[in-house]
Image (tube, helix red, strand yellow):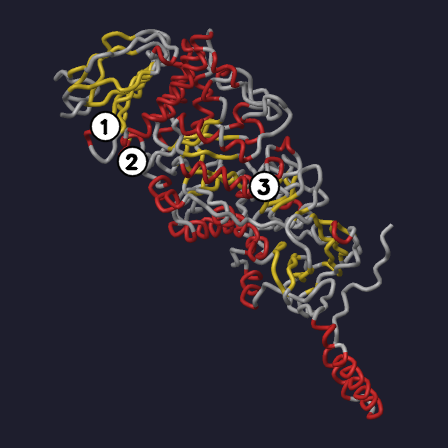
């Protein structure tokens, strides 16, 4: 049992009192002291020769915890006002030199604690040996320098709360944690000699909203496992040799890593974060993750990180009830507890919490050179009644259901990201009709760069799950997205959420026999890559994995030995290159001027025809999608301009395990008015196929 604490703060020396005692010393005592000093000096002179052989630098004897601070008064002012965006330079553990001695400075925010100490391996996890000093201001920060403690030391904070709770907490700002199930923080640094300057200097060209943006979504622990030991994870460094060349070969422009911040529960997929400033130790060190990101950059591939400011777990060692009070989470459980995920919601109205979260976002853009943040569960942040029944929530001051504090926070977060790192992107996973998610803050929006187009995802998957014979009754599900496609900067996602919990894989959502399933899926991907907006595809879907995603196992890479799965992979690779090579598919991806219906109403044949346009008319494309297994010969299509139109993509190509039906020669347009256009071409449309045409320009 821990020894009872009888004092709440360590006693600091009273300098003034000490000087007063010395000044009041009696004359006799002064004389005696002088005599003693004279004798000592004589002895020292006698032993000069011996002493010179033993002389060492004089080091001041330091206390167990020395008064020391990295905070200025300005830092404290910024922190308390919620405007300090680089708190990771101040809080946490930092190896420094103080009074000629190397040690570690610790700083933690615990305003309602009576006593805080560092417990660690170096002191046998003693709660009383290394108490931190409570700052004299009202910041609630406890800090101090502990000599001879360096990188690699495991530690926690012992907190004796104002309600006499005794808590052992990991460091919210720790840069590294022990590998779960162990829960201690580790003194570490994020020093790394980056070698990605070429990318960083030019990434605006890769991240701009008028450039191709094709994202490969990856869950790090299950993309691949060690073949010799399937239960073991590959490290960040090992994955650099496997994942980077694969993504490059497939033609994706970006990769998105599902949360790689430290999390205690692996089946949460990383969405229950405990260590917001630490890369998950399951896969290696911070520097190994930096190496992986650097390797992507060297190959011209951007890295997006999933970021979770919406909620956190209630583990005893984590943020919940941090100093015995609702410090990080909202005290009102109607705002502070998430009923779906049984987790806790940040108090977005508390300045220090806002500074913590925004500092964390900028930390990953700064220290890890991340090229963007995909923000999880934005809808749950925006609405007070999200997933709550009547009586389980309270309206805002205007009587509405919007969480005004969260709205304000998200605007400030986006302004901070784009003001500090204008060549990055923030992407919202937001599933409602909230207005202006991807519009600038100065225009009244939330300020995100892009928003997931969840409506398109659900409608499209639902449409393709129907047997082709019934699709004419669901035609509006295919075309409806173009009514609102340009109200936001939309990203089209086929994400991990669609291939778990019994939903089946993307392949198994498709109807028909094996051939039709593969043809349908190639057609769906063709529709996604030619539809306005950026793209996201979850791992395994690119080669049509048959089973739904299982986070406990590697993807079924052996399927690439079979021609149907290899053909799907080749189709996705070709679509990525089509998207990257054709300006009409990305230059106006968020602009209504980049899309034009040629025929969106052919319900009976389940065929849609549209044009995609870029900045130059010579790059215009005509896209034709046949949603039935019926081959359409001599099918006339109106075209924007007269000339020779060449088929540049066919989802039914034999290389993709298709039937090979299509248009092998360029087709000269005729002055036959069709689809409201003066010129048209006669084409063949393959079964369950997509064909793309481009005008030949001499």
* Horizontal relation, residue 684 to residue 142: left or right: left
The image shows residue 298 at horizontal and vertical percentages of: 41, 38
Q: Nearer the viewer, mark 3 or mark 1?
A: 3
Give the answer, above or below, for where 386 lies relative to 319.
above
User: Which residue is rendered at x = 77% and y = 80% of the image?
Assistant: 46
Circle 1 packing at 10 Å, graded few (<14), some (14-19), many (20+), is: many
* Horizontal relation, residue 287 to residue 453: left or right: right
Gap between marks 1 and 2, in whole Å?
11 Å
Q: Mark 2 or mark 3, which is nearer the start of the sequence?
A: 3
Q: Which element carries disc 3, helix, strand or loop? A: loop
Confirm or deny contact between disc 3 and disc 2 (CB under 8 A). Answer: no
User: Which residue is rendered at x = 63% and y = 35% of the image?
Assistant: 340
Q: Closer to the camera, 443 or 277? A: 277
Image disc number at residue 587:
2
Q: Closer to the camera, 535 or 46? A: 46
Q: Closer to the camera, 558 or 219? A: 558
Residue 202 picture quarter: top left
Give the answer, above or below, for where 131 lies relative to 545.
below
The image shows residue 544 at horizontal and vertical percentages of: 47, 17
Q: Which residue is mark 1?
A: 620
The image shows residue 42 at horizontal and vertical percentages of: 77, 84
Q: Which element carries disc 1, helix, strand or loop? A: loop
Q: Which residue is mark 3?
A: 285
Gap between marks 3 and 1, in whole Å?
48 Å
Residue 34 picture quarter: bottom right
Q: Which element carries disc 2, helix, strand or loop? A: loop
The image shows residue 458 at horizontal and vertical percentages of: 47, 25
Q: Mark 2 or mark 1, which is nearer the start of the sequence?
A: 2
Give the answer, above or below, for where 415 lies relative to 431.
below
Confirm or deny contact between disc 1 and disc 2 (CB under 8 A). Answer: no
């Amino acid at each position: 049992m821990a020894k009872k604490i009888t004092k709440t703060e360590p006693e600091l020396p009273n300098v003034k009192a000490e000087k007063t005692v010395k000044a009041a010393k009696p004359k006799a005592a002064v004389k005696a002291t002088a005599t003693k000093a004279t004798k000592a000096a004589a002895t020292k002179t006698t032993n000069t020769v011996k002493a010179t052989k033993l002389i060492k630098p004089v080091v001041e004897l330091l206390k167990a915890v020395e008064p020391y601070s990295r905070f200025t008064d300005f830092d404290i002012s910024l922190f308390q006002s919620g405007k300090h965006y680089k708190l990771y330079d101040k809080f946490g553990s930092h190896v420094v030199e103080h009074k000629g001695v190397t040690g570690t400075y610790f700083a933690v925010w615990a305003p309602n604690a009576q006593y805080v100490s560092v417990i660690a391996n170096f002191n046998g996890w003693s709660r009383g040996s290394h108490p931190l000093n409570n700052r004299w201001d009202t910041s609630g920060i406890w800090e101090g320098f502990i000599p001879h403690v360096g990188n690699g030391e495991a530690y926690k904070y012992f907190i004796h709360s104002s309600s006499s709770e005794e808590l052992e907490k990991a460091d919210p700002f720790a840069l590294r944690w022990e590998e779960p199930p162990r829960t201690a923080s580790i003194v570490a640094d994020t020093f790394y000699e980056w070698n990605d300057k070429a990318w960083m200097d030019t990434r605006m060209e890769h991240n701009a909203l008028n450039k191709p943006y094709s994202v490969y979504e990856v869950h790090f622990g299950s993309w691949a496992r060690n073949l010799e030991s399937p239960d073991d994870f590959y490290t960040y460094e090992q994955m650099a040799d496997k994942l980077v060349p694969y993504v490059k070969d497939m033609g994706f422009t970006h990769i998105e890593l599902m949360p790689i911040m430290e999390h205690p529960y692996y089946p949460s997929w990383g969405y229950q974060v405990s260590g917001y400033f630490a890369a998950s130790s399951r896969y290696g060190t911070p520097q190994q993750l930096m190496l992986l990101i650097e390797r992507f950059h060297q190959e011209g591939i951007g890295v997006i990180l999933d970021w979770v400011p919406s909620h956190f777990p209630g583990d005893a060692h984590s943020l919940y009830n941090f100093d015995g009070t609702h410090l990080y989470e909202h005290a009102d459980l109607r705002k502070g507890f998430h009923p779906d995920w049984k987790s806790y919601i940040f108090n977005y109205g508390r300045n220090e919490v806002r500074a913590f979260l925004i500092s964390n976002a900028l930390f990953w853009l700064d220290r890890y050179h991340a090229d963007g943040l995909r923000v999880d569960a934005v809808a749950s942040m925006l609405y007070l009644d999200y997933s709550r029944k009547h009586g389980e929530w309270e309206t805002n001051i205007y009587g509405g259901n919007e969480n005004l504090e969260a709205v304000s926070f998200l605007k400030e977060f986006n302004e901070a990201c784009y003001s500090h790192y204008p060549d990055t992107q923030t992407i919202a996973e937001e599933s409602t009709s909230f207005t202006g998610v991807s519009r600038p803050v100065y225009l009244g929006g939330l300020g995100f760069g892009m928003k997931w187009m969840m409506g398109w995802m659900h409608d499209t998957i639902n449409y393709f799950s129907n047997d082709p014979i019934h699709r004419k009754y669901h035609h509006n599900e295919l075309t409806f997205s173009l009514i609102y496609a340009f109200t936001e900067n939309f990203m089209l996602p086929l994400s991990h959420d669609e291939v778990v919990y019994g939903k089946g894989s993307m392949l198994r959502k498709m109807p028909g026999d094996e051939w039709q399933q593969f043809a349908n899926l190639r057609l769906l991907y063709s529709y996604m890559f030619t539809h306005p907006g950026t793209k996201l595809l979850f791992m395994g879907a690119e080669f049509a994995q048959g089973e739904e995603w299982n986070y406990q196992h590697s993807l079924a890479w052996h399927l690439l030995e079979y021609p149907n799965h290899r053909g799907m992979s080749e189709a996705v690779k070709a679509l990525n290159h089509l998207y990257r090579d054709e300006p009409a598919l990305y230059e106006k991806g968020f602009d209504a001027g980049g899309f034009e219906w040629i025929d969106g109403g052919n319900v009976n044949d389940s065929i849609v025809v549209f044009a995609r346009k870029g900045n130059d008319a010579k790059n215009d494309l005509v896209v034709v999608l046949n949603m039935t297994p019926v081959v359409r010969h001599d099918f006339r299509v109106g075209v924007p301009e007269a000339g020779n139109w060449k088929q540049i993509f066919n989802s039914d190509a034999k290389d993709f395990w298709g039937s090979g039906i299509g248009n092998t020669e360029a087709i000269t347009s005729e002055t036959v008015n069709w689809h409201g256009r003066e010129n048209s071409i006669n084409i063949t449309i393959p079964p369950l196929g997509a064909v793309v045409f481009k005008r030949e320009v001499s």
